[in-house]
């Protein structure tokens, strides 16, 4: 049975607060790992830009296989045990890095393996989490829930990388990862305290059929015009976002020669922007239609990425330019993503939501590492500056993709309305 509903929103919902507390722990730790792993590769192991790109790819590529195989499993099973298991697995993997460093056995191979397995567990967690929220709070409250969770995630984005930079300088990069392992254990403990039971209708006894599950996930996404538009737009964003994922640390630590603490501070500004973006979701929803808000925020958020290649020519203004990019880009893209996830949760059938979420992870998980690999090769061939310009301009292609799909949807709706009999 579902827990008694609070009288004044989700902050009175006890089990949502436990889910929120779990995210506080894992979100901070995840930001530390995301920031520290490439720092370890660059400063401790002396990795090249191509090796850093490979490390970035390894952190997301296994998620494609996970997305292909677990969507149906998530739909057929209760979600909370999957979330707890993913947390415990990530904790064990993360702890292996400082232990190897302690014994002097840390290598690039281990970093890649840890990145791959943590990325796979994270994909499972994200697919199950996106499907679990509607079961926990109800479909009418998913926008509020997503906004609150995204705001928390944004606070972690602000504090996690900055904390990571300080920890690297004080403790060394490998030892900084110990904080992440602890955070995953805390997350698992909070999830274990959730008392709300998923309703029996949310769990099917149907046997898993991987090929049919994959087809069902993509079919339900492509059959809904707005969901299809979001899938295509997020695919474009993921491919060119892979450029930033692979080369941002190379740009800041090597080309601009910024200290790790400064890089952490710059990335942390993005978290502040994400928090502001989460607060803007409700006001923008009152001022304009959801689809208009999504399109506007996507366009301005992607345009902010132009400041990254500009920072290479900005001299003393490089750090301010990067901070503006982090704040504006994260704020506006957070609004877009909250609406995108909420629309998916509210629109698609609950019994197919896990497979639909898996389809999004497969698309973005395929295109993100593909973009990272292309970025590493391109940076070697034509230079870092040209590659970052390609990334920034390419990300803007998501805007016409989304706009054309929305325009087609509106036109179809108008034709359907005009053909209805009057009276």
Image: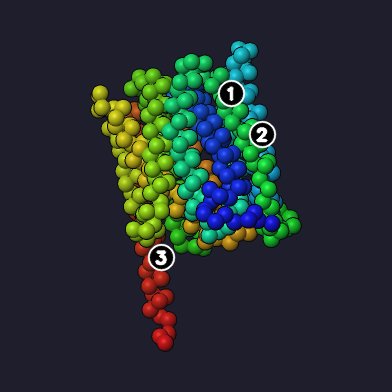
Q: How many marks?
A: 3
Give the left or right position of residue 407, taking residue 175 as reference: left
Disc 1 crowd, CA 10 A, few/some/many (<14, 14-19, 20+): many
- Image quarter where the N terminus lies is bottom right
| Callout 2: SS | helix
Give the left or right position of residue 276, taking residue 357 as reference: left
Q: Earlier in the sequence, mark 1 or mark 3?
A: 1
Q: What residue is shown with label 1?
A: 178
Residue 231 is situated, as x and y percent measured from the top left of the image, at 47, 53
Residue 198 is situated, as x and y percent measured from the top left of the image, at 67, 54
Mark toward the viewer: 2 or 3: 2
Front one among 68 and 284: 284
Specify the label residue 409 is tagged with: 3
Say which quarter of the image contains residue 253: top left
Q: CA distance from mark 2 to mark 3?
A: 43 Å
| Callout 1: SS | helix
Q: Say if mark 1 contacts mark 3, CB within 8 Å.
A: no
Q: Residue furthest top?
A: 104
| Callout 3: SS | helix
- The reply to whether residue 56 is visible in this rendering is no
Q: Earlier in the sequence, mark 2 or mark 3?
A: 2
Picture residue at 35% right of the left edge, 19% below the top: 257
Q: Residue furthest front?
A: 7
Vertical relation: 27 (above or below) 312 = below
- The reply to whether residue 173 is visible in this rendering is yes
Picture residue at 39% right of the left edge, 37% below the top: 272
Picture residue at 51% right of the left edge, 16% below the top: 172
Q: CA distance from mark 1 to mark 2?
A: 14 Å
Say which quarter of the image contains residue 379: top left
Residue 290 is situated, as x and y percent measured from the top left of the image, at 40, 58
Q: What residue is shown with label 2?
A: 88
């Amino acid at each position: 049975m579902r827990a008694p509903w609070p009288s004044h929103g989700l902050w009175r919902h006890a089990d949502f607060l436990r889910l929120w507390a779990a995210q506080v722990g894992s979100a901070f730790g995840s930001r530390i790992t995301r920031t520290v792993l490439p720092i370890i590769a660059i400063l401790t192991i002396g990795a090249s830009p191509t090796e850093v790109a490979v490390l970035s790819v390894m952190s997301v590529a296994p998620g494609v296989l996970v997305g292909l195989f677990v969507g149906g499993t998530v739909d057929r099973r209760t979600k909370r045990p999957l979330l707890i298991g993913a947390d415990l697995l990530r904790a064990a993997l993360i702890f292996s890095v400082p232990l190897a460093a302690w014994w002097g056995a840390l290598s690039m191979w281990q970093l890649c393996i840890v990145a791959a397995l943590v990325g796979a567990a994270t994909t499972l967690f994200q697919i199950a989490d996106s499907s679990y929220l509607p079961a926990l709070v109800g479909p009418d409250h998913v926008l509020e829930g997503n906004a609150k969770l995204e705001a928390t995630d944004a606070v972690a984005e602000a504090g996690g990388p900055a904390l990571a930079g300080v920890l690297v300088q004080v403790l060394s990069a490998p030892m900084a990862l110990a904080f992440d392992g602890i955070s995953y254990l805390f997350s698992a403990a909070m999830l274990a305290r959730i008392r709300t039971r998923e309703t029996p209708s949310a769990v099917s006894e149907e046997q898993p059929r991987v090929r049919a599950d994959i087809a069902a996930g993509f079919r339900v996404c492509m059959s809904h015009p707005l969901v299809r538009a979001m899938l295509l737009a997020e695919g474009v964003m993921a491919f060119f976002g892979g450029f930033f994922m692979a080369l941002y640390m190379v740009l800041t630590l090597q080309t601009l020669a910024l200290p790790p603490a400064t890089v952490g501070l710059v990335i942390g500004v993005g978290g502040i922007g994400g928090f502001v973006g989460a607060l803007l979701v409700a006001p923008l929803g009152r001022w304009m239609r959801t689809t208009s808000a999504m399109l506007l925020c996507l366009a301005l958020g992607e345009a902010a990425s132009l400041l990254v290649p500009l920072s290479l020519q900005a001299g003393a203004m490089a750090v301010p330019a990067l901070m503006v990019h982090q704040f504006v880009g994260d704020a506006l893209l957070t609004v877009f993503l909250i609406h995108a996830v909420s629309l998916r949760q509210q629109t698609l059938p609950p019994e197919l939501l896990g497979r639909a979420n898996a389809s999004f992870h497969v698309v973005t998980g395929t295109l993100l590492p593909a973009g990272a690999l292309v970025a590493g090769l391109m940076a070697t061939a034509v230079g870092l500056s040209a590659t970052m310009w390609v990334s920034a301009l390419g990300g803007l292609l998501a805007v016409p993709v989304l706009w054309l799909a929305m325009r087609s949807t509106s036109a179809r709706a108008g034709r359907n309305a005009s053909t209805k009999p009057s009276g």
